[in-house]
Amino acid sequence: MAKDNLSFESLDENHLQIIEARHHDPFTVLGLHGDTLLVFMPLAESVVLQDINLPLERITGSDFFIGHIKNGDQLPLHYQLAWLDKAGTSHLSHDPYSFGSQLPDFDQHLFGEGKHWHIYKKLGAHLHTVDGIQGVHFAVWAPNAQRVSVVGDFNHWDGRSHPMRNLGAGGIWELFVPGLSCGCLYKFEILNRNTQQLLLKTDPYGQQFEFRPNTSSIVVNENSYKWRDHRWMGNRVNFDWLHEPISIYEVHLGSWKRDQQGNFLNYKELAVELVAYAKELGFTHIELLPISEHPLDASWGYQTTGYFAPTSRHGTPDDFRYFVDTCHQNNIGVILDWVPAHFPKDGFALSRFDGSALYEHEDPRKGEHRDWGTLIYNYGRNEVKNFLLASAVFWLEEFHLDGLRVDAVASMLYLDYSRKHNDWIPNRYGGKENLEAIDFLRELNEVTHDQHPGTVVMAEESTAWPQVTRPTWTGGLGFSMKWNMGWMHDTLSYMSHDPIHRMHHHNQLTFGLLYAFSENFALPFSHDEVVHGKGSLINKMPGDEWQRFANLRLLFTFMFTYPGKKLLFMGCEFGQGTEWNFNRSLDWYVLEYPHHKGMQTLIKDLNYLYKTQPALFSHDFDPQGFEWLDCHDVQQSIISYRRKSEFEEVIVVLNFTPVPRENYRVGVPNPGTYHVIFNSDSHYYYGSNTGNGAVSSEPRLWMNQPHSINLTLPPLGAIILKL
């Protein structure tokens, strides 16, 4: 461009591409090249090179400003521009196009290999300092873009103002914008190179978002929180979850409790109220329905758009850190419901992110859940797999979470999941197994267990897929635990029958022990069982009010004495009568009634008993911890068994009919006096208080045991005895 011909007509194709916002590498045009400085500032009325007080000249008919540096002028590497906007406001800023690339080749290579567990520290938006100059570094993966710009409240959302540099074949774009700080709003404006479609997208790696329905990403200070859970984190490394009690309180933060105006509680308020409540009731862990950012309340968080951001419904990321920190200081672990199985079609997020099927599959037979209206990740693409693996590491590392519960694993494992026979594509061997998803899940478990020992990853897997919780090196998927959906369905089905008919369904109580130790099982009475017309747990129980509460107390006692870790959804612990509604608080007022208060007391006592009796937890996952005494008393609907540890045991007897059973004999292995240490029919729980206090054994062979005791069994009740 000739120095004396500064007009629009003098501009070449590169300059026109800058003007039209379609240039893939603006650094080749903008900035200082030789003795010529060229800036493109659509928002500026005039521009001065501040360091040498050189007014830049507007190229007629354009928003380019040009200046020529004279010999002898000393210009710093990162010069400053003083400019007036069209409203007459003055600004002073360093030129972003004076800074070199800030993303090392090694990080790009690891990401391309799918092996960069901390890529969230590189991609996204991060406070950054270059040569003493503070600002924000932006980076995004968009390989099918012709041009990407960062837009925000700092440039009037104008995609011409801050076009990003393309780093080459890996598809990453980056730009360091000096002068920006935490709190600024931003998105990425993406021009697809094939269709010229213009897209406005939130940051896939964004760590905070606006309160819905707004969707902008927010720059955060990632290193501002001072943790105080050092003792917990130090102990967690050696946490032997296989042989320790785990009792989980599953919570949807938006509906556990709300304020008097019906608004969400924030993370700090929940750190006071929810933590104190869970601690009082004796739960060892709180599991949160997804709090990763999501646009639709009615999805309960399962349609996630922000895989690196706690939802702003309850506060800032540091507020959430405070919640986790408070849990740990009160000896309560935190597990996050995490959703790598699908994502929503919302246009502002991951769907066709750069105008192509980037995170999903192009073919809807592989890339879409028809019945959920959501998209399926392309687990075979390294960058997509890395995105998800980094998200898992992020929650465990940056928020000190103690585990993840992976939602809808079955939908990931099977290519034909919930599909018609002609609506899926077989794998390369002609089978229905999703080989890429299987590899992803194995790598997920290997990486998280290696990077964060003592944490757990739990699978919601509803089929008979083998070795879900067995090591990957034996052919397993490598999960820590699996939800025991079969036990849950069988048990709830059995309990729903009128007691007079239960004798015909006795196998639903006993069948589960045939496979109880084939996996590391957790026993879930989760949110899925108290929604969508299924009714609350208390209203699944048959009979009048007294019988329904007795049945539920019996059910909970069965769960807490059965092999497996425990999970209970909020509200079930006090017998909430109405079905769960995500849009309002639980019915806390029912605790004014003795039946409900008694139920809550029962859960508190069961948690205490579970945590203090090694026989009830130390061998949850192997058969040496369980032995039937009698599983054949079909006519009276009674079962009895031993739970054992190395040094002690307890006897459990459960009566599933409303008839008290007097002189009921149970075999025991050792002579002595057996004390009833728990009775679900106790008056403390608003029961009828039927049963024994202590009984002495007799040397009478019974149930293949050398001794026996004579008991009075409460109606619809369970007792636990200890020598």
Image (tube, grey):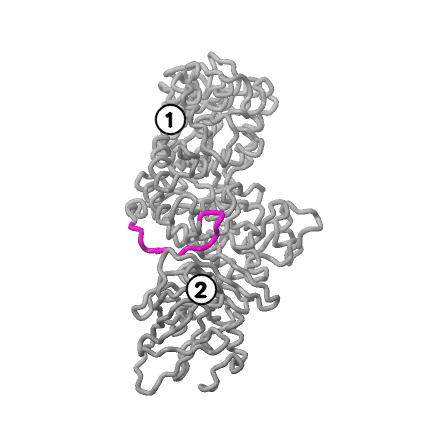
Residue range highlighted in magenta: 211-226
- Say if 646 sits above or below 55 in the image: above
Label 1 element class: helix
Image vertical order of residue 274 relative to residue 310, above or below = above
Query: On the image, which quarter does residue 51 sit in?
Result: bottom left
Pick whichever of labels 1 and 2 is earlier in the sequence.
Answer: 2
Residue at image location 50% in from the left, 73% down from the top: 18
Question: Which amino acid, mark 1?
Answer: Asp
Q: Which residue is mark 2?
A: 139
| Residue drawn 39% across the image and 24% down it | 601
- State the image coordinates of residue 580 (x, y, percent, origin top left): 51, 32
Viewer-proximal residue among 112 and 51: 51
Q: Residue furthest top?
A: 662
Identify the residue under disc 1. 605
Q: Is residue 462 magenta?
A: no
Label 1: how many residues lie within 10 Å, few (<14), some (14-19) or many (20+)? some
Relative to 492, 334 lies left or right: left
Residue 223's image quarter?
bottom left
**Distance from the alpha carbon under mark 1 to that under mark 2:** 52 Å
**Numbered disc 2: secondary structure:** strand
Horizontally, residue 278 falls left or right of residue 416, namely left
- Is residue 148 visible in the rendered image? The answer is yes
The quadrant of the picture occupied by the C terminus is: top left
Estimate the x, y position of residue 57 in percent, counting from the top left: 42, 78
Residue 620 visible: no
Q: Amino acid at mark 2?
A: Ala
